[in-house]
Image (spheres, helix red, strand yellow):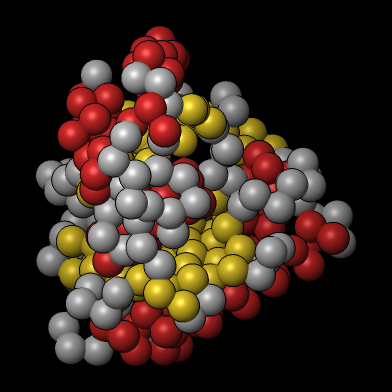
Amino acid sequence: MTDLARRRDAAAAIAVEAAALAARMRAAGQGVPSLKGAQNFVTEADTATERFIRARLEQDFPGEAILGEEMGGAPDRAGPLWVLDPIDGTSNFARGSDRWCVSIGLVVDGRAVAGAIARHAPAEIFAAAEGFGATLNGAPIRAAPTTDISRAIIECGWSLRLPIAEFHRMAQGVTTLGAGVRSGGSGALGLVESAAGRIDGYLERHINAWDAAAAIAIAREAGCWTNAFDSGDWLASGNPVGVGAPGIGGHLAALLAG
């Protein structure tokens, strides 16, 4: 596909508008959560934001397939396929925290090739397209130059689809190597903050496609070590995900494998 940069820019513009919409809805009292499952929150803003993103994508790219967290889609289509999370970090969003984002990724032939992730406050837009590099607010970003795992900060995400003991084991592995560990409640932000070098890696034993499609494309273009997240049945079933400083990639791969 020859127009990846145009699609990246379109995704970025839509993501910024969608984040502003979600923030307005929360300010108007439409951020009260309900539960889809244990610790799996959704708000009125999630659904409205996904509808907005879908309408804009359908306007700009008519007939192209869309897969979203709240409204589903057809994950088996070869592509192009837009994969989106209207609000990643809904539990943070619902509690008034600003650690949430809008994620819009583009998948072609089963591979994540472009994407944009927007925060409302602070106003940040992470974006990338394969072959064009990765940016934050238009400025190039790169993975951290870290080579000593004992000096690293690693974020570990957790999934209810796996026993909580797996998360504990991975976090213990991180600290045993001397690295610091954190968990911030937004996988997409953890992944792109690794791409920007703010932290040294992000690991999660299971994450869904909509949480990480955009972020994995951004991380690769930022020079991160990445696992084979967008492989196999990832669009339908998710996969383990890992990104981080290339100088500690071997350690990250071992920690992810358990």
Q: Is residue 147 above or below residue 170?
A: below
The reply, left or right, for residue 253 in relation to residue 60 is left
Q: In the rendered image, which quarter is residue 140 located in?
A: bottom left
Question: Residue 252 appears at what percent x and percent y?
Answer: 27, 33
Q: Where is the N terminus found, in terms of image quarters?
A: bottom left
Q: Residue at x 68, y 42 (%)?
A: 92
The reply, left or right, for residue 29 in relation to residue 13 is right
**Is residue 82 in sight in this rendering?**
no
Question: Residue 78 appears at what percent x and percent y?
Answer: 14, 66
The reply, left or right, for residue 77 in relation to residue 105 is left
Q: Tell which of 161 and 72 is nearer to you.
A: 161
Q: Is residue 95 above or below residue 206?
A: below
Q: Is residue 154 above or below residue 197?
A: above
Q: Tell which of 34 and 240 is nearer to you.
A: 240
Q: Residue at x 53, y 76 (%)?
A: 137
Q: Residue at x 57, y 38 (%)?
A: 185
- Name of the residue lying farthest toward the right: 28
The reply, left or right, for residue 249 in relation to residue 149 is left
**Is residue 172 in sight in this rendering?**
yes
Q: Residue at x 59, y 46 (%)?
A: 89
Q: In the rendered image, which quarter is residue 29 located in?
A: bottom right
Question: Residue 258 appears at what percent x and percent y?
Answer: 24, 19
Query: How many numbered marks, from 0 up?
Result: 0
Q: Tell which of 78 and 229 is nearer to you.
A: 229
